[in-house]
Image (tube, rainbow, N blue to C red):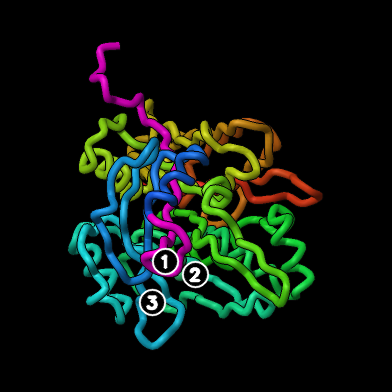
Amino acid sequence: MDKAPYSCVPYCERVGNLHIHTLASDGSASHDAVAQAATKAGLDFIIVTDHDVYLPAHQGWKGGVLLLVGQELRALESSHGNHLLVIGAQEDLLGHAGDPQHLIDTVAEYGGQSYIAHPIDLASKAARERSFNWDQWSVQGYSGIEIWNYMSEFKSHLDTVGRMLLYVFFPSLAIRGPFASTLSAWDQALMHRDVWAIGGSDAHAITYKRGLFKRQVFSYEHLFRMVNTHILVEQQWNGDLAHDAGLVYDALAKGRSFVAYDGLASARGFDFNAVYNEATYTIGESVSLEAEGNGWPVRFEVTIPQRANIRLLRDGLVVAQERSMRLVYTTSEPGVYRVEVYKPYLLHERGWIFSSPIRIKSA
Ligand SMILES: [Zn+2]
Ligand SMILES: [Zn+2]
């Protein structure tokens, strides 16, 4: 095929982690050490989102990984929660934090994206951590929701010191999937407009101490092997920071993303698309039914890299389900379609893959 050397056909999958703290806020390693851990974990890109500070000088290719810098900001001045991840604004927006809608609007003015971080975040008595929920659901115009935050989910299971000790050593016992309440808040938002899914580790690699007990939970490398965001980019990297960062921001902005618990099994190779009237639509796109197309069906195809329980949902309800490596579903029903994949591990079905949606719009 006579294609430009850097083109992807039709997309290249890139795996990244985009909720990370360094020593510049409350993390425990430098940007370089974090990038090294990401390279070891096999990630393609990371987006460091330190609290409050914005340090773009750290951006660039480091080892095998593209390091980008965003911010995590407290959207509402009077609360501890209501954290917003700001990505791609390329400007320090701390001065605009304090009023959620103003902050979201400002991020958009700067051409950036805003994601509601850990929207449901439960307190943990045993780990002495408070709750950092999002409760400003009347806001409009944010880009997406962090539907799965590894450390936030982990923390939610630490209701007793006994469980804390167990899960600190065997975290895979604790990790089940996004909170149902987060998924339903996302489905609600999707009824009105496109809202994309991201997932992150909220990597701090902090140390828990209780008397003689002291353990780091968890290393950056461990965290980067767990819940990640996979994106579909239109071109290969070419090593130029602005070009390569642009590919990441473009894929995220258009919702070509899915969240995966790669610690369970690598989700590389997951594919979700819709075929309508000989055109193929990918994650994040909308199929517009044609008025004269009376009854032409849309054919959804889901392919996963290992056999698991695939669910296709329309407007938050399961419409098709298959324990297989592939699911095909034909429909002419408008709605918001997204995929969830679950995989059994240690006696429980664990969440594995959660895609951003494909929307069918009526004629
Ligand atoms: Zn946060
Ligand atoms: Zn955070």
Image check: 102 left or right of 115?
Answer: left
Q: Amino acid at mark 3?
A: Ser
Q: Quadrant of ligand 2?
A: bottom left
Judge depth for marks 3 and 2 and give the one in front: 2
Q: Residue furthest left?
A: 109
- Who is closer to the viewer here, 194 or 113? 113
What residue sits right under mark 3 in the picture? 138
What residue sits right under mark 2 in the picture? 119
Report the number of discs: 3
Q: Which mark is residue 116?
A: 1
Q: Give the image location of residue 123, x and y in percent.
A: 61, 78
Q: Is residue 338 above or below residue 53?
A: above
Q: Give the image location of residue 199, x and y in percent.
A: 49, 54
Quarter of the image with the N terminus is top left
Q: Disc 2 vs disc 1: Cβ atoms closer than 8 Å?
A: yes
> Residue 16 magenta-drawn?
yes
Q: Residue at x 28, y 44 (%)?
A: 60
**Residue 79, quarter of the rendered image:** bottom left
How far, Cα to Cα, is label 1 from label 3? 12 Å
Q: Give the image location of residue 72, x and y in percent.
A: 37, 67
**Residue 210, quarter of the rendered image:** bottom right
For marks 1 and 3 on the same chain, the one whose residue lies earlier in the sequence: 1
Range of the magenta residues? 1-30
Q: Give the image location of residue 46, x and y in percent.
A: 40, 48
How far, Cα to Cα, is label 2 from label 1? 6 Å
